[in-house]
Image (cartoon, grey):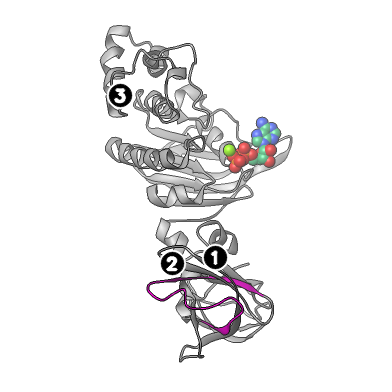
Protein backbone atom coordinates (compact mmCIF):
# COMPACT_ATOMS: atom_id res chain seq x y z
CA UNK A 1 0.00 0.00 0.00
CA UNK A 2 1.32 3.44 -0.87
CA UNK A 3 1.01 6.30 1.62
CA UNK A 4 0.49 9.96 0.87
CA UNK A 5 0.49 12.65 3.52
CA UNK A 6 -0.84 15.98 2.33
CA UNK A 7 -0.38 19.26 4.16
CA UNK A 8 -0.61 17.65 7.56
CA UNK A 9 -0.60 19.84 10.64
CA UNK A 10 -0.58 18.43 14.18
CA UNK A 11 -0.64 20.69 17.21
CA UNK A 12 -0.54 20.34 20.99
CA UNK A 13 -2.13 23.21 22.94
CA UNK A 14 -2.36 25.30 19.74
CA UNK A 15 1.35 24.94 19.09
CA UNK A 16 2.11 23.17 15.80
CA UNK A 17 4.53 20.26 16.17
CA UNK A 18 4.06 19.09 12.57
CA UNK A 19 3.43 21.88 10.13
CA UNK A 20 2.04 21.55 6.63
CA UNK A 21 3.95 18.34 6.01
CA UNK A 22 3.58 16.49 2.70
CA UNK A 23 5.16 13.17 1.87
CA UNK A 24 4.66 10.27 -0.55
CA UNK A 25 5.83 6.73 0.27
CA UNK A 26 5.55 4.17 -2.54
CA UNK A 27 4.16 0.65 -2.03
CA UNK A 28 6.73 -1.74 -0.50
CA UNK A 29 9.16 1.04 0.38
CA UNK A 30 11.35 0.97 3.47
CA UNK A 31 11.09 4.62 4.44
CA UNK A 32 13.28 5.98 7.23
CA UNK A 33 12.25 9.08 9.09
CA UNK A 34 15.46 10.52 10.47
CA UNK A 35 15.75 13.52 12.74
CA UNK A 36 16.97 14.77 16.11
CA UNK A 37 15.09 14.16 19.32
CA UNK A 38 12.02 16.40 19.65
CA UNK A 39 11.59 17.17 15.93
CA UNK A 40 8.19 15.43 15.78
CA UNK A 41 8.93 11.89 14.53
CA UNK A 42 6.84 10.04 17.13
CA UNK A 43 4.03 12.55 16.71
CA UNK A 44 3.97 11.94 12.97
CA UNK A 45 3.92 8.14 13.46
CA UNK A 46 1.17 8.35 16.05
CA UNK A 47 -0.87 10.54 13.75
CA UNK A 48 -0.44 8.05 10.90
CA UNK A 49 -1.48 5.24 13.28
CA UNK A 50 -4.53 7.18 14.45
CA UNK A 51 -3.50 7.69 18.08
CA UNK A 52 -2.95 11.44 17.75
CA UNK A 53 -5.50 13.58 15.89
CA UNK A 54 -4.48 15.93 13.08
CA UNK A 55 -5.40 19.60 13.02
CA UNK A 56 -5.69 19.53 9.26
CA UNK A 57 -4.47 17.68 6.20
CA UNK A 58 -5.10 14.38 4.44
CA UNK A 59 -3.67 10.92 4.97
CA UNK A 60 -4.11 8.60 2.01
CA UNK A 61 -3.65 4.84 2.27
CA UNK A 62 -3.74 3.91 -1.40
CA UNK A 63 -6.56 6.14 -2.65
CA UNK A 64 -8.47 6.21 0.61
CA UNK A 65 -8.33 9.14 3.04
CA UNK A 66 -8.14 7.55 6.50
CA UNK A 67 -7.62 10.70 8.56
CA UNK A 68 -11.06 10.35 10.20
CA UNK A 69 -10.78 6.58 10.87
CA UNK A 70 -10.01 5.29 14.38
CA UNK A 71 -6.69 3.47 14.91
CA UNK A 72 -8.13 -0.08 14.85
CA UNK A 73 -9.61 0.46 11.39
CA UNK A 74 -6.35 1.58 9.79
CA UNK A 75 -4.73 -1.85 9.30
CA UNK A 76 -1.35 -0.94 10.75
CA UNK A 77 1.26 -2.93 12.66
CA UNK A 78 3.30 -0.92 15.11
CA UNK A 79 6.53 -1.60 16.98
CA UNK A 80 7.27 0.74 19.87
CA UNK A 81 10.63 1.76 21.27
CA UNK A 82 10.01 -0.05 24.58
CA UNK A 83 8.33 -3.01 22.74
CA UNK A 84 5.18 -2.64 24.94
CA UNK A 85 4.87 -6.41 25.45
CA UNK A 86 2.44 -7.80 28.03
CA UNK A 87 4.82 -8.95 30.79
CA UNK A 88 2.46 -11.53 32.26
CA UNK A 89 1.58 -13.21 28.97
CA UNK A 90 3.60 -15.80 27.06
CA UNK A 91 5.36 -15.05 23.80
CA UNK A 92 2.55 -16.95 22.05
CA UNK A 93 -0.19 -14.86 23.67
CA UNK A 94 1.67 -11.63 23.00
CA UNK A 95 1.87 -12.46 19.31
CA UNK A 96 -1.71 -13.80 19.21
CA UNK A 97 -3.09 -10.59 20.70
CA UNK A 98 -4.01 -8.82 17.46
CA UNK A 99 -5.64 -11.91 15.98
CA UNK A 100 -7.74 -12.49 19.12
CA UNK A 101 -8.84 -8.86 18.95
CA UNK A 102 -9.95 -9.59 15.38
CA UNK A 103 -12.09 -12.50 16.58
CA UNK A 104 -9.90 -15.42 15.47
CA UNK A 105 -10.43 -18.73 17.31
CA UNK A 106 -7.46 -20.31 19.09
CA UNK A 107 -7.41 -23.24 16.63
CA UNK A 108 -7.30 -20.90 13.70
CA UNK A 109 -4.65 -18.55 15.05
CA UNK A 110 -2.25 -21.21 16.36
CA UNK A 111 -0.58 -22.09 13.03
CA UNK A 112 -0.40 -18.42 12.04
CA UNK A 113 1.32 -17.45 15.32
CA UNK A 114 3.77 -20.37 15.20
CA UNK A 115 4.65 -19.65 11.57
CA UNK A 116 5.32 -16.01 12.42
CA UNK A 117 7.53 -17.03 15.36
CA UNK A 118 9.51 -19.23 12.94
CA UNK A 119 9.78 -16.31 10.59
CA UNK A 120 11.40 -14.08 13.21
CA UNK A 121 13.60 -16.94 14.43
CA UNK A 122 11.88 -17.53 17.77
CA UNK A 123 10.98 -21.16 17.10
CA UNK A 124 10.36 -23.07 20.33
CA UNK A 125 10.16 -19.99 22.57
CA UNK A 126 6.36 -19.59 22.47
CA UNK A 127 5.82 -20.59 26.14
CA UNK A 128 8.36 -18.14 27.59
CA UNK A 129 7.43 -14.95 29.38
CA UNK A 130 9.02 -11.75 28.02
CA UNK A 131 11.22 -11.48 31.15
CA UNK A 132 12.91 -14.77 30.16
CA UNK A 133 14.02 -13.38 26.78
CA UNK A 134 17.00 -11.30 25.69
CA UNK A 135 16.50 -7.75 24.41
CA UNK A 136 16.84 -8.86 20.80
CA UNK A 137 14.32 -11.66 21.29
CA UNK A 138 11.81 -9.29 22.87
CA UNK A 139 12.28 -7.01 19.94
CA UNK A 140 11.45 -9.88 17.59
CA UNK A 141 8.31 -10.74 19.60
CA UNK A 142 7.18 -7.15 19.12
CA UNK A 143 7.91 -7.43 15.40
CA UNK A 144 6.03 -10.75 15.14
CA UNK A 145 3.06 -9.26 16.98
CA UNK A 146 2.98 -6.32 14.56
CA UNK A 147 3.29 -8.50 11.44
CA UNK A 148 1.01 -11.44 12.32
CA UNK A 149 -2.13 -9.46 11.52
CA UNK A 150 -0.73 -8.98 7.99
CA UNK A 151 -1.02 -5.19 8.14
CA UNK A 152 -0.73 -3.01 5.06
CA UNK A 153 1.70 -0.69 6.81
CA UNK A 154 4.39 -1.29 9.43
CA UNK A 155 5.41 1.56 11.73
CA UNK A 156 8.52 1.26 13.88
CA UNK A 157 9.46 3.92 16.41
CA UNK A 158 13.19 3.70 17.25
CA UNK A 159 12.93 -0.09 17.58
CA UNK A 160 16.66 -0.66 18.01
CA UNK A 161 17.53 2.07 20.47
CA UNK A 162 17.41 -0.20 23.54
CA UNK A 163 19.82 -2.75 22.10
CA UNK A 164 23.59 -2.79 22.37
CA UNK A 165 25.64 -2.01 19.27
CA UNK A 166 26.31 -5.56 18.13
CA UNK A 167 22.72 -6.67 18.50
CA UNK A 168 21.51 -3.49 16.85
CA UNK A 169 23.51 -4.27 13.73
CA UNK A 170 22.16 -7.84 13.67
CA UNK A 171 18.54 -6.76 14.24
CA UNK A 172 18.87 -4.02 11.66
CA UNK A 173 19.78 -6.49 8.97
CA UNK A 174 17.13 -9.02 10.00
CA UNK A 175 14.46 -6.30 9.99
CA UNK A 176 15.61 -5.27 6.52
CA UNK A 177 15.50 -8.85 5.28
CA UNK A 178 12.08 -9.53 6.78
CA UNK A 179 10.67 -6.32 5.35
CA UNK A 180 11.78 -7.27 1.85
CA UNK A 181 10.39 -10.84 2.23
CA UNK A 182 7.02 -9.62 3.45
CA UNK A 183 7.08 -6.69 1.00
CA UNK A 184 5.30 -4.43 3.46
CA UNK A 185 5.45 -0.64 3.24
CA UNK A 186 7.43 0.41 6.31
CA UNK A 187 8.12 3.63 8.15
CA UNK A 188 11.12 3.31 10.44
CA UNK A 189 11.84 6.16 12.84
CA UNK A 190 15.32 6.79 14.15
CA UNK A 191 17.60 9.53 15.36
CA UNK A 192 20.65 7.36 14.71
CA UNK A 193 22.21 8.30 11.41
CA UNK A 194 24.09 5.02 11.15
CA UNK A 195 20.96 2.92 11.30
CA UNK A 196 19.13 4.13 8.28
CA UNK A 197 21.73 4.21 5.53
CA UNK A 198 21.93 0.42 5.52
CA UNK A 199 18.21 -0.29 5.46
CA UNK A 200 16.38 2.36 3.57
CA UNK A 201 14.98 2.73 0.11
CA UNK A 202 14.13 6.32 0.96
CA UNK A 203 15.13 8.62 3.80
CA UNK A 204 13.22 11.67 4.96
CA UNK A 205 15.34 13.99 7.09
CA UNK A 206 13.13 15.82 9.55
CA UNK A 207 13.91 19.06 11.38
CA UNK A 208 11.55 21.01 13.57
CA UNK A 209 8.28 19.47 12.34
CA UNK A 210 9.23 19.66 8.66
CA UNK A 211 10.84 17.29 6.19
CA UNK A 212 14.00 19.01 4.94
CA UNK A 213 14.88 16.50 2.25
CA UNK A 214 13.70 13.17 0.89
CA UNK A 215 15.89 10.91 -1.18
CA UNK A 216 17.77 7.64 -1.46
CA UNK A 217 20.62 7.15 1.04
CA UNK A 218 23.04 8.12 -1.75
CA UNK A 219 21.07 11.29 -2.59
CA UNK A 220 21.00 12.36 1.02
CA UNK A 221 24.70 11.72 1.57
CA UNK A 222 26.05 12.93 -1.75
CA UNK A 223 23.70 15.78 -2.58
CA UNK A 224 22.38 17.28 0.66
CA UNK A 225 20.28 20.37 0.11
CA UNK A 226 20.85 22.03 3.48
CA UNK A 227 23.61 22.31 6.08
CA UNK A 228 21.31 20.53 8.53
CA UNK A 229 20.94 17.48 6.29
CA UNK A 230 24.67 17.43 5.48
CA UNK A 231 25.54 17.57 9.15
CA UNK A 232 22.99 15.03 10.26
CA UNK A 233 23.96 12.32 7.80
CA UNK A 234 27.68 11.60 7.93
CA UNK A 235 30.52 13.92 8.78
CA UNK A 236 30.39 17.35 7.17
CA UNK A 237 32.74 20.32 7.06
CA UNK A 238 30.68 23.48 6.74
CA UNK A 239 32.15 26.85 5.78
CA UNK A 240 29.78 29.81 5.92
CA UNK A 241 29.92 32.07 2.88
CA UNK A 242 29.11 35.78 2.62
CA UNK A 243 25.57 36.47 1.39
CA UNK A 244 25.11 35.53 -2.27
CA UNK A 245 24.27 38.53 -4.45
CA UNK A 246 22.20 36.46 -6.85
CA UNK A 247 20.59 32.99 -6.91
CA UNK A 248 22.85 30.11 -7.92
CA UNK A 249 21.68 27.54 -10.44
CA UNK A 250 22.76 23.94 -10.70
CA UNK A 251 26.34 23.32 -11.76
CA UNK A 252 29.75 24.84 -11.10
CA UNK A 253 29.98 28.21 -9.40
CA UNK A 254 32.74 30.58 -8.39
CA UNK A 255 32.15 31.75 -4.81
CA UNK A 256 33.82 34.26 -2.54
CA UNK A 257 34.93 32.65 0.70
CA UNK A 258 36.59 34.50 3.59
CA UNK A 259 39.81 32.95 2.25
CA UNK A 260 39.42 34.08 -1.33
CA UNK A 261 37.64 32.72 -4.41
CA UNK A 262 36.81 29.03 -4.51
CA UNK A 263 35.30 26.80 -7.16
CA UNK A 264 32.26 24.93 -5.93
CA UNK A 265 29.36 22.88 -7.23
CA UNK A 266 25.65 23.13 -6.63
CA UNK A 267 23.23 20.21 -7.07
CA UNK A 268 20.30 22.39 -6.17
CA UNK A 269 18.87 25.77 -7.02
CA UNK A 270 19.96 28.16 -4.25
CA UNK A 271 18.16 31.38 -3.36
CA UNK A 272 20.15 34.55 -2.89
CA UNK A 273 20.60 34.18 0.84
CA UNK A 274 23.12 32.59 3.14
CA UNK A 275 24.76 29.55 1.68
CA UNK A 276 27.42 27.26 3.05
CA UNK A 277 30.18 25.32 1.46
CA UNK A 278 30.04 21.65 2.48
CA UNK A 279 32.96 19.26 2.04
CA UNK A 280 33.02 15.68 3.34
CA UNK A 281 36.14 14.79 5.40
CA UNK A 282 37.13 12.10 2.87
CA UNK A 283 37.01 14.61 0.00
CA UNK A 284 39.80 16.82 1.32
CA UNK A 285 43.41 16.02 0.57
CA UNK A 286 46.50 17.32 2.36
CA UNK A 287 49.55 18.32 0.39
CA UNK A 288 52.89 20.06 0.92
CA UNK A 289 52.55 22.12 -2.26
CA UNK A 290 49.62 23.94 -3.78
CA UNK A 291 49.33 21.46 -6.64
CA UNK A 292 47.28 22.13 -9.72
CA UNK A 293 43.84 21.97 -8.15
CA UNK A 294 41.66 25.05 -8.20
CA UNK A 295 40.97 24.92 -4.49
CA UNK A 296 43.89 24.89 -2.10
CA UNK A 297 43.94 26.59 1.25
CA UNK A 298 46.89 27.00 3.61
CA UNK A 299 46.24 25.14 6.85
CA UNK A 300 47.87 23.79 9.96
CA UNK A 301 47.43 20.39 11.58
CA UNK A 302 45.96 20.63 15.07
CA UNK A 303 45.17 17.01 15.82
CA UNK A 304 45.64 13.54 14.43
CA UNK A 305 44.06 10.14 15.20
CA UNK A 306 45.09 6.92 13.56
CA UNK A 307 41.92 4.89 12.84
CA UNK A 308 43.34 1.86 11.06
CA UNK A 309 41.89 2.13 7.58
CA UNK A 310 42.22 5.91 7.67
CA UNK A 311 43.77 8.76 9.61
CA UNK A 312 41.64 11.54 11.01
CA UNK A 313 43.20 15.03 10.96
CA UNK A 314 41.87 18.17 12.60
CA UNK A 315 43.12 21.17 10.64
CA UNK A 316 42.68 24.91 11.01
CA UNK A 317 42.53 27.53 8.26
CA UNK A 318 43.97 31.10 8.55
CA UNK A 319 40.49 32.47 9.41
CA UNK A 320 40.27 29.90 12.26
CA UNK A 321 37.77 27.69 10.45
CA UNK A 322 38.33 24.14 11.67
CA UNK A 323 37.99 21.23 9.28
CA UNK A 324 38.14 17.47 9.60
CA UNK A 325 40.10 15.51 7.01
CA UNK A 326 40.11 11.73 6.56
CA UNK A 327 43.02 10.33 4.58
CA UNK A 328 42.84 6.67 3.65
CA UNK A 329 45.36 4.37 2.01
CA UNK A 330 49.07 3.89 2.60
CA UNK A 331 51.35 6.51 4.10
CA UNK A 332 48.42 8.64 5.23
CA UNK A 333 49.80 9.14 8.75
CA UNK A 334 52.86 10.99 7.53
CA UNK A 335 51.94 14.55 8.59
CA UNK A 336 52.72 15.88 12.06
CA UNK A 337 50.77 18.01 14.51
CA UNK A 338 51.76 21.64 14.08
CA UNK A 339 52.83 21.18 10.47
CA UNK A 340 51.77 23.81 7.91
CA UNK A 341 50.60 22.61 4.53
CA UNK A 342 47.67 22.87 2.10
CA UNK A 343 44.15 21.48 2.10
CA UNK A 344 42.97 20.73 -1.44
CA UNK A 345 39.62 19.63 -2.81
CA UNK A 346 37.92 19.23 -6.15
CA UNK A 347 35.22 21.70 -7.12
CA UNK A 348 32.63 18.92 -7.53
CA UNK A 349 33.18 17.91 -3.89
CA UNK A 350 32.75 21.45 -2.55
CA UNK A 351 28.98 21.57 -2.43
CA UNK A 352 26.87 24.68 -2.02
CA UNK A 353 24.04 24.06 0.44
CA UNK A 354 21.44 26.21 2.19
CA UNK A 355 22.85 27.50 5.45
N1 LIG B 1 1.12 14.69 24.10
C1 LIG B 1 1.85 15.81 23.96
N2 LIG B 1 1.49 16.98 24.50
C2 LIG B 1 2.23 18.12 24.34
N3 LIG B 1 3.36 18.17 23.63
C3 LIG B 1 3.80 17.03 23.06
C4 LIG B 1 3.08 15.79 23.19
N4 LIG B 1 3.75 14.83 22.51
C5 LIG B 1 4.84 15.44 21.99
N5 LIG B 1 4.88 16.76 22.31
C6 LIG B 1 5.92 17.72 21.90
O1 LIG B 1 6.04 17.65 20.50
C7 LIG B 1 7.40 17.76 20.09
C8 LIG B 1 7.79 16.57 19.24
O2 LIG B 1 7.80 15.42 20.04
P1 LIG B 1 8.02 13.96 19.43
O3 LIG B 1 7.06 13.76 18.31
O4 LIG B 1 7.96 13.00 20.56
O5 LIG B 1 9.51 14.09 18.85
P2 LIG B 1 10.56 12.94 18.48
O6 LIG B 1 9.85 11.64 18.41
O7 LIG B 1 11.13 13.37 17.15
O8 LIG B 1 11.62 12.96 19.54
C9 LIG B 1 8.20 17.90 21.37
O9 LIG B 1 8.46 19.26 21.57
C10 LIG B 1 7.29 17.34 22.43
O10 LIG B 1 7.54 17.94 23.66
MG1 LIG C 1 10.22 9.84 19.47
Residue at image mark 2: 310
Q: Is mark 2 within 8 Å of ligand 1?
A: no
| Viewer-side residue, 78 vs 82 | 82
In x, y percent, where is residue 40?
61, 42
Question: Position of 58 compared to 146: left or right?
Answer: right
Distance from disc 2 to disc 3, alpha carbons, whole Å, reads: 43 Å
In x, y percent, where is residue 122?
32, 24
| Viewer-side residue, 160 vs 248 | 160
Ligand 1: quadrant of the figure: top right
User: Disc 2 vs disc 3: Cβ atoms closer than 8 Å?
Assistant: no
Label 1 secondary element: loop
Distance from disc 3 to disc 1, alpha carbons, whole Å, reads: 42 Å
**Picture residue at 34% right of the left edge, 16% below the top:** 126
Mark 2: few, some, or many residues within 10 Å (few <14, many ≥20)?
Answer: some
Name the disc covering residue 236, or none: 1
Label 3 secondary element: helix
Question: Position of 22 compared to 196: left or right?
Answer: right
Distance from disc 1 to disc 2, alpha carbons, whole Å, reads: 16 Å
In x, y percent, where is residue 181?
27, 37
Q: What stretch is highlighted in magenta?
A: 321-343
**Picture residue at 46% right of the left edge, 30% below the top:** 79
Residue at image mark 3: 116
Q: In this view, does 135 lie above or below 192?
A: above
- Dot 2 or dot 3, earlier in sequence: 3
Mark 1: few, some, or many residues within 10 Å (few <14, many ≥20)?
Answer: many
Would residue 224 be counted in the magenta stretch?
Answer: no
| Viewer-side residue, 314 vs 206 | 314
**Picture residue at 39% right of the left edge, 41% below the top:** 172
Camera-side mark, 2 or 3: 2
| Viewer-side residue, 262 vs 98 | 262
Asked whether the viewer can see residue 325, the reply is: yes
Amino acid sequence: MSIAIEQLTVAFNHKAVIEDLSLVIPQGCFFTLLGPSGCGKTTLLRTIAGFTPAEKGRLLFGNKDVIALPAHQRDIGMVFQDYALFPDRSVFDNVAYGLIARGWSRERLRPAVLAMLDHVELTGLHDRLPAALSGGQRQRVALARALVIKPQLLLMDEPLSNLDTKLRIQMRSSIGKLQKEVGITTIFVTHDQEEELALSDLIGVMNNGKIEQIGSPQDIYQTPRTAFVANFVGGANLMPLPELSSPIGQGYAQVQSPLGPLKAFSHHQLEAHHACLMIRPEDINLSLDTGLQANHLPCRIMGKHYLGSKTHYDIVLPDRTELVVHLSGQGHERYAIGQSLFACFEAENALLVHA
